[in-house]
Image (spheres, grey):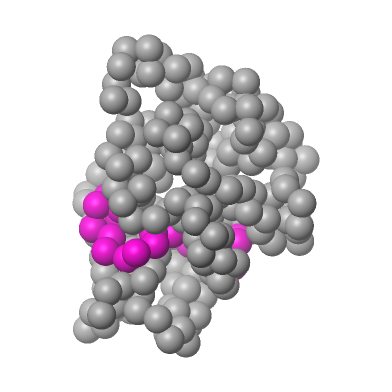
Amino acid sequence: MPLKLSVIIPCCNEQNRFQNGFNHYSSYLKTQNYSWELILVNDGSTDKTLKLMLQNVKKNKKIKIISYPKNQGKGYAIVQGIKKAKGKYILFSDLDHSVPIETIDLFFKYFDKGFDAVIGSRRVKGARLLVRQSKLREFLGKGFTFLARCLIDPRIKDATCGFKAFEKETAKKIFSKITIYDWAFDAELLFLCKKFKIDYVQAPVSWTDVKGSKVSVAKDVLRSFIGLLQIRFNDLQGNYK
């Protein structure tokens, strides 16, 4: 029976949050009547993250682990998961489940309508912010989205929400072109959707801020802006053909 859903969760030094996050995803998936796989990607953790993965997976063939020794960034981890994913639909999300996994039920309805990609958004009608980020992070997120709209695609409402799903062939095509693995990864992804004329929808999500983010405000904001410029440069160089 073909797999319906692949869920990819990138992890780096998440020993304190891993068990809660793993339980959130696995407990939901185990109750579904469709076929699925959960792909955990250990992005060069130096703590006990990989050990915890191995302890929880054991002999469950529906749960897979990808691991490599050097940290490469969230985007790289997701790309590795996409390469291995076999589901008809592929979702990537965050271990902290700031957007709950049951949101995928809504996303399936959009796929049934013919969309090739469903992009979670906190800034479209119907979205709910249950616990907000700090004012600084919220301001920076909105600022990055504004720049992404100017430089990438004016349709973008929320460039940084980490809950996105794709039809398999669409995912394989887009993610093979990814070159940026840090905070600008999502913007490159959305640019490629525009570049390849992917029919995507921005869907409302319920979102809760969870403490423990690895984002460094001072470092990653600058890198993200540089990343946006790199995307435009890549396109001019013909790197996305």
The residue positioned farthest toward the front in the image shown: 113
Q: In what quadrant of the picture does the C terminus appear?
A: top left
Magenta region, residue range: 79-100
Q: Is residue 65 visible?
A: yes
Residue depicted at 76% across the width and 57% down the height = 126
Residue 233 in magenta? no
Q: Is residue 38 above or below residue 133?
A: below
Residue depicted at 59% across the width and 52% down the height = 120
Residue depicted at 44% across the width and 79% down the height = 29
When asked about the image quadrant of residue 215, the answer is top right
Estimate the x, y position of residue 94 in percent, counting from the top left: 49, 57
Please tell me how many numbered marks the rendered image carries: 0
In depth, the one of 8 and 235 nearer the eye is 235
Q: Is residue 207 visible?
A: no
Residue depicted at 61% across the width and 60% down the height = 98
**Residue 104 in the figure: left or right of residue 11:** right
